[in-house]
Amino acid sequence: MLNKIRIACFDYLSKRLLRKNGVKFAANIVSRGVPYVKVYKGGSITIGDNFKMNNNFAANIIGRQQKCIYISKGSLIIKDNVGISSTAIICHNAITIGNNVLIGGNTVIYDTDFHSLDFKDRNAVPEIVANIKTAPVVINDNVFIGAHSIILKGVTVGKNSIIGAGSVVARNIPENEIWAGNPAKKIKDIA
Protein backbone atom coordinates (compact mmCIF):
# COMPACT_ATOMS: atom_id res chain seq x y z
CA MET A 1 0.00 0.00 0.00
CA LEU A 2 2.79 2.42 0.94
CA ASN A 3 4.54 1.70 -2.36
CA LYS A 4 1.36 2.53 -4.33
CA ILE A 5 1.05 5.82 -2.47
CA ARG A 6 4.71 6.62 -3.14
CA ILE A 7 4.32 5.90 -6.88
CA ALA A 8 1.16 8.05 -7.04
CA CYS A 9 3.06 10.94 -5.38
CA PHE A 10 5.99 10.58 -7.80
CA ASP A 11 3.57 10.52 -10.74
CA TYR A 12 1.81 13.66 -9.50
CA LEU A 13 5.07 15.55 -8.89
CA SER A 14 6.57 14.42 -12.20
CA LYS A 15 3.51 15.44 -14.21
CA ARG A 16 3.43 18.78 -12.45
CA LEU A 17 7.11 19.34 -13.29
CA LEU A 18 6.53 18.35 -16.92
CA ARG A 19 3.56 20.73 -17.24
CA LYS A 20 5.55 23.56 -15.63
CA ASN A 21 8.18 23.11 -18.35
CA GLY A 22 5.63 23.04 -21.20
CA VAL A 23 6.12 19.34 -21.94
CA LYS A 24 3.28 17.75 -23.92
CA PHE A 25 2.57 14.24 -22.63
CA ALA A 26 -0.09 11.55 -22.50
CA ALA A 27 -1.90 11.06 -19.20
CA ASN A 28 -0.74 7.47 -18.78
CA ILE A 29 2.93 7.98 -17.98
CA VAL A 30 4.49 6.30 -14.96
CA SER A 31 7.32 7.88 -13.01
CA ARG A 32 9.20 6.23 -10.17
CA GLY A 33 10.98 9.18 -8.65
CA VAL A 34 11.02 12.72 -10.02
CA PRO A 35 13.12 13.61 -13.11
CA TYR A 36 15.10 16.77 -13.85
CA VAL A 37 13.48 18.71 -16.72
CA LYS A 38 14.60 21.95 -18.40
CA VAL A 39 13.05 23.24 -21.62
CA TYR A 40 14.67 26.39 -22.98
CA LYS A 41 12.95 29.04 -25.07
CA GLY A 42 12.48 27.58 -28.54
CA GLY A 43 12.77 24.02 -27.24
CA SER A 44 10.05 21.41 -26.91
CA ILE A 45 9.47 17.97 -25.45
CA THR A 46 6.63 15.65 -26.49
CA ILE A 47 6.07 12.29 -24.74
CA GLY A 48 3.67 9.62 -26.03
CA ASP A 49 1.47 6.95 -24.43
CA ASN A 50 2.64 4.32 -21.94
CA PHE A 51 5.90 6.09 -21.07
CA LYS A 52 7.72 4.69 -18.03
CA MET A 53 10.72 6.29 -16.33
CA ASN A 54 12.76 5.20 -13.33
CA ASN A 55 14.36 8.14 -11.51
CA ASN A 56 15.66 6.73 -8.26
CA PHE A 57 17.71 4.02 -6.64
CA ALA A 58 14.81 1.81 -5.60
CA ALA A 59 13.14 1.84 -9.03
CA ASN A 60 15.89 0.00 -10.93
CA ILE A 61 18.96 -0.96 -8.92
CA ILE A 62 21.76 -1.15 -11.48
CA GLY A 63 24.42 1.13 -9.98
CA ARG A 64 25.35 4.76 -10.64
CA GLN A 65 21.78 5.90 -10.08
CA GLN A 66 20.57 9.35 -11.01
CA LYS A 67 17.32 11.02 -11.96
CA CYS A 68 16.31 10.99 -15.60
CA ILE A 69 17.43 14.25 -17.15
CA TYR A 70 15.64 15.94 -20.05
CA ILE A 71 17.14 19.15 -21.37
CA SER A 72 15.83 20.60 -24.61
CA LYS A 73 16.85 23.59 -26.65
CA GLY A 74 15.56 21.76 -29.74
CA SER A 75 12.82 19.24 -30.49
CA LEU A 76 12.74 16.12 -28.29
CA ILE A 77 10.06 13.60 -29.27
CA ILE A 78 9.52 10.37 -27.34
CA LYS A 79 6.84 8.18 -28.94
CA ASP A 80 4.65 5.41 -27.44
CA ASN A 81 5.61 2.50 -25.16
CA VAL A 82 9.07 3.77 -24.20
CA GLY A 83 10.82 2.81 -20.97
CA ILE A 84 13.95 4.43 -19.53
CA SER A 85 15.97 4.36 -16.31
CA SER A 86 18.37 7.04 -15.04
CA THR A 87 18.80 8.31 -18.59
CA ALA A 88 20.10 11.74 -19.66
CA ILE A 89 18.74 13.12 -22.93
CA ILE A 90 20.33 16.43 -23.95
CA CYS A 91 18.74 17.93 -27.06
CA HIS A 92 20.11 21.07 -28.73
CA ASN A 93 18.87 20.19 -32.24
CA ALA A 94 16.46 17.22 -32.56
CA ILE A 95 16.11 13.82 -30.92
CA THR A 96 13.38 11.36 -31.86
CA ILE A 97 12.81 8.11 -29.97
CA GLY A 98 10.45 5.71 -31.71
CA ASN A 99 7.76 3.34 -30.45
CA ASN A 100 8.46 0.33 -28.23
CA VAL A 101 11.99 1.42 -27.27
CA LEU A 102 13.78 0.31 -24.08
CA ILE A 103 16.71 2.42 -22.89
CA GLY A 104 18.90 0.85 -20.20
CA GLY A 105 20.00 2.60 -17.05
CA ASN A 106 22.50 5.44 -17.18
CA THR A 107 22.39 5.73 -20.94
CA VAL A 108 23.07 9.20 -22.33
CA ILE A 109 21.83 10.57 -25.66
CA TYR A 110 23.46 13.78 -26.96
CA ASP A 111 22.78 15.58 -30.24
CA THR A 112 25.55 18.12 -29.57
CA ASP A 113 29.29 18.32 -28.97
CA PHE A 114 28.57 20.85 -26.16
CA HIS A 115 31.78 22.78 -27.03
CA SER A 116 33.50 23.82 -30.24
CA LEU A 117 36.15 21.46 -31.56
CA ASP A 118 38.39 24.51 -32.16
CA PHE A 119 40.52 25.15 -29.06
CA LYS A 120 40.48 28.90 -29.74
CA ASP A 121 36.68 28.95 -29.45
CA ARG A 122 36.78 26.82 -26.28
CA ASN A 123 39.45 28.96 -24.63
CA ALA A 124 37.91 32.33 -25.51
CA VAL A 125 36.38 34.32 -22.67
CA PRO A 126 33.48 34.09 -22.99
CA GLU A 127 33.57 30.78 -24.86
CA ILE A 128 32.57 31.13 -28.53
CA VAL A 129 29.51 28.92 -29.01
CA ALA A 130 28.69 29.76 -32.64
CA ASN A 131 30.76 26.83 -33.98
CA ILE A 132 29.38 24.08 -31.76
CA LYS A 133 28.28 21.16 -33.92
CA THR A 134 24.85 19.53 -33.50
CA ALA A 135 23.06 16.89 -35.56
CA PRO A 136 19.74 15.07 -35.08
CA VAL A 137 19.55 11.68 -33.37
CA VAL A 138 16.89 9.17 -34.43
CA ILE A 139 16.23 5.96 -32.51
CA ASN A 140 13.72 3.96 -34.52
CA ASP A 141 10.97 1.58 -33.36
CA ASN A 142 11.65 -1.56 -31.30
CA VAL A 143 15.24 -0.64 -30.39
CA PHE A 144 16.82 -1.88 -27.16
CA ILE A 145 19.77 0.10 -25.80
CA GLY A 146 21.79 -1.61 -23.06
CA ALA A 147 22.73 0.12 -19.81
CA HIS A 148 25.54 2.69 -19.65
CA SER A 149 25.58 3.33 -23.41
CA ILE A 150 26.38 6.65 -25.09
CA ILE A 151 24.54 7.73 -28.25
CA LEU A 152 26.24 10.68 -29.98
CA LYS A 153 25.08 13.40 -32.35
CA GLY A 154 24.02 12.54 -35.89
CA VAL A 155 23.30 8.86 -35.15
CA THR A 156 20.33 6.92 -36.50
CA VAL A 157 19.62 3.53 -34.94
CA GLY A 158 17.60 1.31 -37.29
CA LYS A 159 14.39 -0.52 -36.40
CA ASN A 160 14.63 -3.61 -34.17
CA SER A 161 18.34 -3.16 -33.48
CA ILE A 162 20.10 -3.81 -30.17
CA ILE A 163 22.99 -1.85 -28.67
CA GLY A 164 25.05 -3.79 -26.12
CA ALA A 165 25.64 -2.41 -22.63
CA GLY A 166 28.43 0.16 -22.30
CA SER A 167 28.60 0.92 -26.02
CA VAL A 168 29.63 4.23 -27.56
CA VAL A 169 27.58 4.80 -30.72
CA ALA A 170 29.09 7.40 -33.04
CA ARG A 171 27.74 6.20 -36.40
CA ASN A 172 24.52 4.89 -37.86
CA ILE A 173 23.30 1.39 -37.03
CA PRO A 174 21.22 -0.39 -39.70
CA GLU A 175 17.94 -2.18 -38.98
CA ASN A 176 17.92 -5.65 -37.37
CA GLU A 177 21.53 -5.70 -36.13
CA ILE A 178 23.28 -6.09 -32.80
CA TRP A 179 26.12 -3.65 -32.13
CA ALA A 180 28.39 -3.30 -29.11
CA GLY A 181 31.72 -1.87 -27.94
CA ASN A 182 33.68 1.37 -27.91
CA PRO A 183 33.37 2.38 -30.63
CA ALA A 184 30.28 0.27 -31.31
CA LYS A 185 30.74 -2.30 -34.08
CA LYS A 186 28.42 -4.83 -35.65
CA ILE A 187 28.29 -8.10 -33.72
CA LYS A 188 25.67 -9.92 -35.81
CA ASP A 189 22.33 -9.75 -37.58
CA ILE A 190 19.17 -10.37 -35.61
CA ALA A 191 17.76 -13.69 -36.79
Image (cartoon, rainbow, N blue to C red):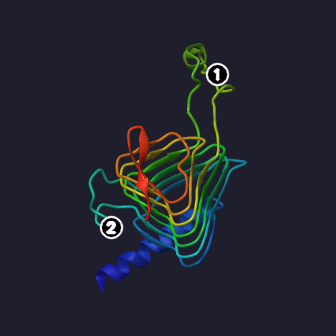
Looking at the image, the residue that sits furthest to the right is: 42
Q: Secondary structure at mark 1?
A: loop
Establish if 49 lies above or below 54. Answer: below
**Residue under pointer 1:** 128
Identified at 59% across, 63% down, the residue is: 98
* Left or right placement of residue 177 versus residue 74 in this view: left
Q: Position of residue 34 (x, y in %)?
A: 44, 63
Q: Position of residue 65 (x, y in %)?
A: 32, 54
Amino acid under disc 1: Ile
Q: Position of residue 16 (x, y in %)?
A: 55, 68
Q: Position of residue 78 (x, y in %)?
A: 59, 62
**Residue under pointer 2:** 59
Instruction: Measure how far apart labels 2 and 1 are at the Cα level.
Output: 40 Å
Identified at 66% across, 44% down, the residue is: 93
Q: Secondary structure at mark 2?
A: loop
Q: Nearer the viewer, residue 116 or 30?
A: 116
Q: The C terminus appears in which quarter of the rendering? A: bottom left
Q: The N terminus appears in which quarter of the rendering? A: bottom left
- In which quarter of the view is residue 24 placed? bottom right
Identified at 57% across, 45% down, the residue is: 155
Say which label, 2 or 1, has the lower sequence index. 2
